[in-house]
Structure formats: C-alpha cells, structure tokens
Amino acid sequence: MECPHCQSQKVIKQGRDSLNDGTLVQRYQCKESKKRFNERTGTPMARLRNDSQVVAYALNARTEGMGVRAAGRTFGKSHTTIMRWENRIAQKAQH
C-alpha cells in the first residue's frame, strides 16, 4: 500500500471503518506524513458509505438501459443518489 498524499511505502494498518451495510473498509496511516486514509482514497468510491458492489450494479443497470427511478427502486436507493453516483463517476473519468 502506498500513501496517496506523499507516495511513501511506510504505511501501517490503523483499524477498519464500517459502511452502512456492515462492510468493513481497511484504514491506514502513513508513518511519514501522519495522514490517515483507507483503501478507497483517491478512487471514485472515496467517501461513499455504500458498498461498492451496490454502486457498481446500479450503474451497470443504468448503462444497460434501466431508468433512474427503476434503478433506485431495484437497489433500494433514492433516484437522486443514483444520479449523484453517475455524476461522481463521470467527473472522475474526465480528470
């Protein structure tokens, strides 16, 4: 694992964070910069409290032609949440 802030290899495990669905995400701390981060830092999934599988399935359903509201009902999320996920992925893809 490499620190996303200073690219140091001196990283230690620093516990786990629990997502809304109970999934655990490993947390790390850099020994050089003293910054904390998790395995999602620097990815489009960073700061999302939802399981990445649910997000991936919902976005895949949208690319296959499912409507926003139908995807929301299918995956138990608000249609605005689905649209925010789409915007987040699109913005990360542009950079």
Image: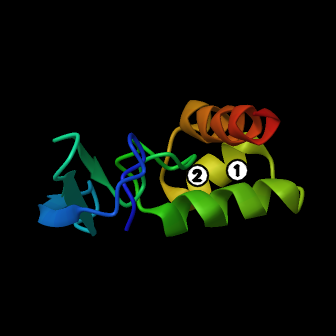
Of 83 and 25, nearer the camera is: 25
Give neighbour class at mark 1: few <14, some 14-19, many 20+ (Cα, 10 Å).
some
Residue at (65% x, 58% y) in the render: 58
Residue at point 88% right, 63% down? 64
The C terminus lies in quadrant: top right
Identify the image quadrant of residue 47: top left
Q: Disc 1 on helix, strand or loop?
A: helix
Q: Disc number at residue 78?
A: none
> Horizontal and vertical percent for residue 80?
59, 30
Q: Which one is in front, 60 or 26?
A: 26
Q: Quadrant of residue 48?
A: top left
Q: Is residue 90 left or right of residue 2?
A: right
Q: Are marks 1 and 2 in contact (CB under 8 Å)?
A: yes
- Name the quadrant of the N terminus: bottom left
Which amino acid type is marked by label 2? Answer: Arg
Residue plotted at (52% across, 69% down): 53
List x then y, in percent, for residue 72.
Answer: 60, 48
What residue is disc 2 on? 73
Please indicate whether residue 8 sits to the left or right of residue 83 in the image: left
Amino acid type at circle 1 is Ala
Is residue 77 placed above or below 2 in the rendered structure? above
Q: Which residue is mark 1?
A: 70
Residue 33 percent coordinates (x, y): 23, 40
- Name the residue nearer the viewer: 38 or 17: 38
Q: Residues within 10 Å of mark 2 (few under 14, many from 20)?
A: few
Give the SS element for disc 2.
helix
